[in-house]
Amino acid sequence: MATSNPVPAVLPSVMSADMLALGSQLGALCDAGARVFHVDVMDGHFVPNLTIGPDFTAAVARAVRPRGGLVDVHLMVERPGYLLELFAPHADAISVHVEADPHVHRLLGEIRRLGCRAGLAVNPGTPLGAVAELADELDYVNCMSVNPGFAGQSFIGTTPVKLARLRDVLPDRVLLEVDGGIGPATLPLARAAGAEWLVSASAIFGRPDPVAAYRELAALAG
Ligand code: DX5
Ligand code: ZN
């Protein structure tokens, strides 16, 4: 496991990268200061979309780790336990959704046992109590600011209130991530509410110059 958490950090979400230019895009973002890269894994069941798997994640890790980068894997997958050993060698942090498995406490322990930071992802409708009960097992919480499944959705306006409530119930050592609809207008709202890892796909890779877009967000994150 890598040593420290870069905080605050803007996490480029590679699902919206140019897949045919992935190596050069990730390298340029590393050179611009990006330190954590977010990998969205969707199974077509937990969310209505399909994305990428362990081999692709290994390629991301090979591109960013030699430059000091970390890989944050977000599993939007039903019953994700069977995938943990496949992703863990290529991941520094793995989050699983509260609703994805009836035994999420066990999964979080397994993620740590495999040497990764353990994260719990919460949907916009997930009650905060589910997070508070698991605080001892957590290294970070991924607070979804859209309904998971697609890049390019609008930031849900009540998210800053939820982030602030999460920050209140979580110990300081648990890092707070926000994911979905993060761009120049919304990042400051999430940051002010306590988010430390700010995931962004379209506001980076959907722009003509992803490096310039990353730099703009990183400056806003502080
Ligand atoms: C959505 C994914 C996000 C997504 C964010 O389900 O979990 O990580 O890539 O995309 P944007 O930043 O475009 O909302
Ligand atoms: Zn994500």
Image (cartoon, rainbow, N blue to C red):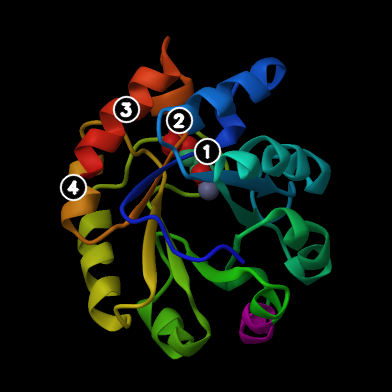
> Is disc 1 surrounded by few (<14), some (14 to 19) or many (20+) residues within 10 Å?
many
Say which residue label 1 marks. Answer: 13
The amino acid type found where label 2 is placed reads Gly
| Residue 203: % across, % down | 38, 27
Q: Is residue 186 visible?
A: no
Say which residue label 2 marks. Answer: 152
Determine contact: label 2, label 1, CB under 8 Å.
Answer: no
Instruction: Determine the CA span between mark 2 and mark 4.
Output: 18 Å
Q: Which mark is residue 189?
A: 4
The amino acid type found where label 3 is placed reads Arg
Q: Secondary structure at mark 4?
A: helix
Q: Quadrant of residue 20?
A: top right
Magenta range is: 102-109
Q: Is residue 62 visible?
A: yes
Between label 2 and label 1, give the one nearer the viewer: 1
Which residue of the protein is positioned furthest toward the top in this rendering? 208
* 131 in magenta: no
Residue 135 vertical placement versus 121 (above, below): below
Q: Earlier in the sequence, mark 3 or mark 4?
A: 4
Q: Earlier in the sequence, mark 4 or mark 1?
A: 1
Q: Earlier in the sequence, mark 2 or mark 4?
A: 2
Say which residue label 3 marks. Answer: 215
Pointer 2 residue Cβ closer than 8 Å to ligand 1: yes
The amino acid type found where label 4 is placed reads Leu
The amino acid type found where label 1 is placed reads Ser
Magenta span: predominant SS is helix
> Is disc 2 surrounded by few (<14), some (14 to 19) or many (20+) residues within 10 Å?
some
Instruction: Determine the CA span between mark 3 and mark 4.
Output: 18 Å
Seen in the image, is 132 located left or right of residue 157?
Answer: right
Determine contact: label 3, label 1, CB under 8 Å.
Answer: no
